[in-house]
Amino acid sequence: MKRILVIYYTQSGQLKEIIDNFARPLRDADIAVDYYRIEMEQEFPFPWTNETFFGVFPESFLQIPQPIKPIPSSILEKNYDLIILAYQVWYLSPSIPINSFLKSKQAKQLLEETPIMTLSGTRNMWIKAQEKINLLINKNKAYLIGNIALTDRNYNHISVITIVHWLFTGKKDKYLGIFPKAGVSQKDIEGATSYGKILLKYLKTGIYNNLQEEIITQGGVQVKSFLLSSEKKGNRLFRIWANIIHQSSHRKLLLKCFHVYLYVAIWIMMPIVWVFYYLTYPFFYRSIRKEVKEVKRIKNSNF
Ligand SMILES: Cc1cc2nc3c(=O)[nH]c(=O)nc-3n(C[C@H](O)[C@H](O)[C@H](O)COP(=O)(O)O)c2cc1C
């Protein structure tokens, strides 16, 4: 009997719902599916406050791990045919819980020589975080065989408004009765079953060569080209901010400045850059298409 482990961290439960739908065809086919939710020694709050939300920025971005509770021995003792790593993105990086897990000694024990499939449920900026996850998978001597990236498909600025409402109140409802619900749509959450069906086929043979292509065809990797270019710029600027704040003795003040900066970046700079991006789009059409194709694929798979 094949055995799969799902390693995940979620606060609202959205990601767990996605995983449950994804894993259904596997469980129906009598594949043993174990779950391990990463638990922090010091949990992060949900809903968030301004202070806690911006307070995690430097350590999220710089990928500084924090203590996690030991992984249960019932999980560590088993050998898995495949591990699903389901994660959130915090500030264009893997969230602190998933990063802390991937940098722990026990992660190496669990992941080494094992095929890994990643699955993320984010607002819409996940590409830089996936690159960072890929590096950590490699460091743990594991192999990436597939990636599913589900996002909020609404317009970027709408998703900013709705996610703030969601993360700061804990309510995934229609903000003011007029905005769409935040996060991954219910249709996409339920549609995760189709990727589980695809994986099942490949799991039987253990050869995953075309798995990612099928996931892409099925719409399992959501990329918007403008956001891809924004992520690259954002990642460079976040690095500067994160290093300055992390080393400073004026952390509180600088976090407030970062808050203002983020507001200006999203509401003033991004729309201006957006206009220039689409004015020049026809000139870069080919290279943009090529890049979008590349990020949908998994670059460092050894399979
Ligand atoms: C501190 C913080 C930073 C986040 N940064 C990003 C980000 O850079 N890109 C993104 O697409 N989503 C970002 N999100 C959204 C999360 O990836 C995720 O979709 C959301 O927290 C809900 O996760 P959950 O339902 O699994 O709890 C962020 C969320 C938090 C709490």
Image (tube, helix red, strand yellow):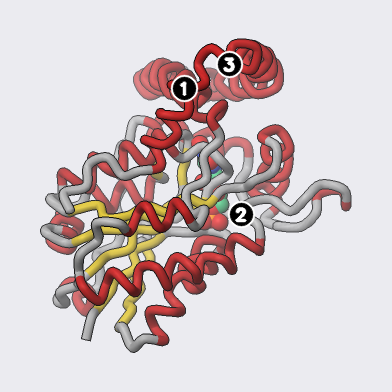
Q: Is residue 235 visible?
A: yes
Judge from the rendering whether residue 147 lies leftward or rightward of residue 274; answer left or right: left
Residue 56 in the image: above or below residue 97: above
Residue 89 in the image: above or below residue 3: above
Query: Does the beta carbon at disc 1 come under 8 Å from ligand 1?
Result: no
Query: Does the beta carbon at disc 3 come under 8 Å from ligand 1?
Result: no
Question: Is label 1 in contact with label 3 (beta carbons under 8 Å)?
Answer: no
Q: Which amino acid, by three-letter code, is at mark 2?
A: Val
Q: Is residue 42 visible?
A: no
Q: Nearer the viewer, residue 214 or 144?
A: 214
The image shows residue 58 at horizontal and vertical percentages of 42, 29
Judge from the rendering whether residue 201 lies leftward or rightward of residue 274; answer left or right: left
Query: Does the beta carbon at disc 2 come under 8 Å from ligand 1?
Result: yes
Residue drawn at x 39%, y 32% is 61
Classify mark 2: residues with Cα within 10 Å, few (<14), some (14-19) or many (20+): many
Residue drawn at x 52%, y 53% is 219
In 3D space, how far apart are the residues under numbered discs 1 and 3 (Cα atoms)?
8 Å
The image shows residue 69 at horizontal and vertical percentages of 29, 62
Please tell me whether mark 2 or mark 3 is closer to you in this view.
3
In primary-sequence order, the first of circles 2 and 3 is 2
Question: Which residue bears the numbered disc 3?
Answer: 282
Please tell me whether mark 1 or mark 2 is closer to you in this view.
1
The image shows residue 245 at horizontal and vertical percentages of 43, 21
Question: Which residue bears the numbered disc 2?
Answer: 184
Q: Which amino acid, by three-letter code, is at mark 3?
A: Pro
Q: Which amino acid, by three-letter code, is at mark 1?
A: Arg
In primary-sequence order, the first of circles 1 and 2 is 2
Question: Which residue bears the numbered disc 1?
Answer: 286
Question: Is label 1 in contact with label 2 (beta carbons under 8 Å)?
Answer: no
